[in-house]
Image: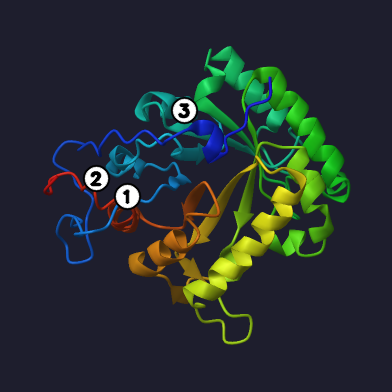
Amino acid sequence: MAVCLNARRWGAALAVGVACLGNLSLIAADGGPAPVVAGETDSPLGIGFLWTAQSDLIAGGLGHGKDFVDVILGPGKLDVFKRVRPPVRVACIARSLEKNEARPFPGIRETIDILRGAGVPPARVIIAYNPEAQPGTPSRELEELVASVREAKEMASAYGAPLLVGPGLREMSKREDLYPELARACDIWMIQSQRLQLDEVTRKPVDVGAYRDGVKRIAERLREGNPKIGIFVQLVTTAERGRVPLDAERVVAFSRSIEDLVDAVRIYGAPAELLGRIIGRMRPATGAPGGEP
């Protein structure tokens, strides 16, 4: 069963409000609750992030139909399905089609076996294939990327979940001609846009117009092959090995500059407090826990 997660197929995102976990709230830059900004509305973008031990602090800020958390499955990781509520999905990441000796994590095949064995319904899941030029991804899978993505799609479809694919932009810069064909072979593409966030020469953050142009060019290539493909974008909160921090305002500005082009953003590298500030600014009309509605 093919599953398409493009916003046009999802329909309107389900805004269920931001739940408070105990007495914790999303924290704004000034240390108080994220404010409701007059005249601003919630971004239509879904929001995603890596699930960690601190994620419970801000998981209540998710609730839209395109929101997700992601995780590499392993011992003790299945409890994430109890700790995040539908309609939020869990993207289960695999670096390879099958487990291999280079990295002791499950591949797509083993990930699906774990999910089936635990009785996790496919409606809660996105299968995320993240081949990279590093240990864990066999070189053959990168060399034959289209064939690898097609094989991943067969496995995800047999389980009943959509397939997200997201190689790094460094890898894709050498094979941009494959974007249309790859888009036809999956349901969602993740643009790892961190290379677009900094100027190639100065290594300083670009302005939002330049960032938008970079994302737009890739999105258009993907939609040449599959007009209905879902597109997620990864943004980092630090760059240049931590030497260039990107505050909540800049990350949100980048995100909102592309909200008519893509379906969701994945915020990478942010501690819980910063994630809270970002979510509070992405959804000012919803308001933050403990703040004014």
Q: Are marks 1 and 2 in contact (CB under 8 Å)?
A: yes
- Name the residue located 11 percent from the left edge and 48 percent from the top edge: 292
Horizontal side of residue 104 vs 42, given as left or right: right
- Name the residue located 20 percent from the left edge and 56 percent from the top edge: 34
Residue density around tag 2, few if under 14, some if 14–19, many if 20 or more, within 10 Å: many
- Name the residue located 67 percent from the left edge and 63 percent from the top edge: 217
Residue density around tag 1, few if under 14, some if 14–19, many if 20 or more, within 10 Å: some
- Name the residue located 23 percent from the left edge and 65 percent from the top edge: 29
Write down the quadrant of residue 56 in the picture: top left
Q: Quadrant of the N terminus?
A: top right
Q: Secondary structure at mark 1?
A: loop
Q: For mark 2, what is the residue?
A: 286
Q: For mark 3, what is the residue?
A: 76
User: Residue type at mark 1?
Assistant: Asp
Q: Does residue 240 appear in the picture of this structure?
A: no
Q: For mark 1, what is the residue?
A: 42
